[in-house]
Amino acid sequence: MSGTVREVVFGDKSEKEEEKVLISLDIEDDKLFLLHFIIGTYFGPDLHDDDPNKKKQSAFQIQASSNLPTKNELSASLMKRAELESVYHHVLRNVDPSLVFNRKVLSRYFNEKRNASNVDFPLFRDLYPSQLHPESRVRNQYKLYESIVFINDPDTSCMRQNCLDRFKLLTGLQGFTLSLNIEATEVDDDETLETLEGGRSCHDEPTLEVNGAIAAGQMMGLMDIGECADAYLFRVSLPGVKRDERHFSCEVEDNGKVLVRGVTTTGEKQVHRYSQVFMMNTQNLYPPGHFSVSFHLPGPVLPQEFIGSFGIDGIFEGTVMKKLQKQTV
């Protein structure tokens, strides 16, 4: 189903049967396998423990033991989602680029809930239930998970050998120890944590509306975001959209929200060209009418410092200066 399988293995020891549970990742896709393996092996629930030298248990070890912690057993530590992703990218830094997920698939892994349509897709919430590891956001900038800890030298004895061998083969690593130090995130007392309902933020994916209805598609509204020290850059795919300023606009708010509005010219049943009338056999592009695309940049901005341009290739590109926090000595 989700790809994580608990298998009971029996063995003889001193004339009595010993039961051991091993985790097997029945995930055909190599990229999904690596992502789920890394998040389940190098991270785990951050439990209260009086012994600082005691080794932390990974999420897979917890699953193998079937002894899920209670909320009271978990610490109140916070881990940035960016830190989880940084470990994933660190492990895969020298592998074939085709094994690294794009942002859209990573977002799906972290944000989706289990339902009938994604039973074959492993999810972050399979390992870290939202009731134990709620998600929040600070200053509208970055997302945090509660009670998750990084483990740079994980115990992999709970994993089937074929999973360990597959991980080494794909990554080129001979061992499982990482030379990384990922600490819990400190949040100042004057910073407000915003709980994200259902573990989902409006910052993750663009919302596309066509003729007043939310739509989903493969081309319209696809988006890339980049940043440098003092500015953000974004690009939005808008094929078939009128570039006329009378019909097109882009608004940027100080909290980083971007709203693009316009009119599509594709998807007609009939197309008139050069005194000829073409009856369209297929209509896969968006229907003609008004549309809007909205999304959030990673942090607050200065709307008055926004510059946008709409190219003939159907890509709208914008840059806007960040609203930088004042530093105090």
Image (cartoon, helix red, strand yellow):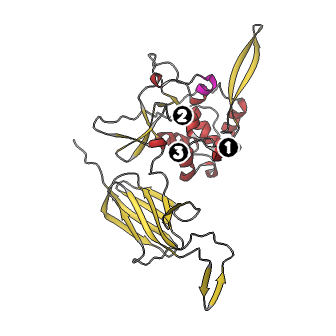
Circle 3 SS class:
helix
Q: Residue at x 41, y 30 (%)?
A: 77
Say what amino acid the circle numbered 3 marks.
Asn
Question: Which image quarter: residue 91?
Answer: top right
Q: Which residue is mark 3?
A: 111
* Residue that lies at the very extreme toward the left in this rendered image: 329
The amino acid beneath tag 1 is Asp
Asked if residue 151 can be seen in this view, the reply is no
Q: Residue at x 53, y 48 (%)?
A: 107
- Gap in angstroms between the C-alphas marked 3 and 2: 12 Å
Q: Residue furthest front?
A: 212
- Image location (x, y in percent) of residue 75: 43, 26
Q: Main secondary structure of the magenta part?
A: helix
| Residue 128 in view in this figure | yes
170 over 321 or under it: above or below: above
- According to the picture, the residue beneath numbered tag 1 turns out to be 120
Amino acid type at image mark 2: Tyr
From the image, tell me which residue sits under label 2: 128
Magenta stretch in the rendered image: 61-66
Distance between the Cα atoms at labels 2 and 1?
18 Å
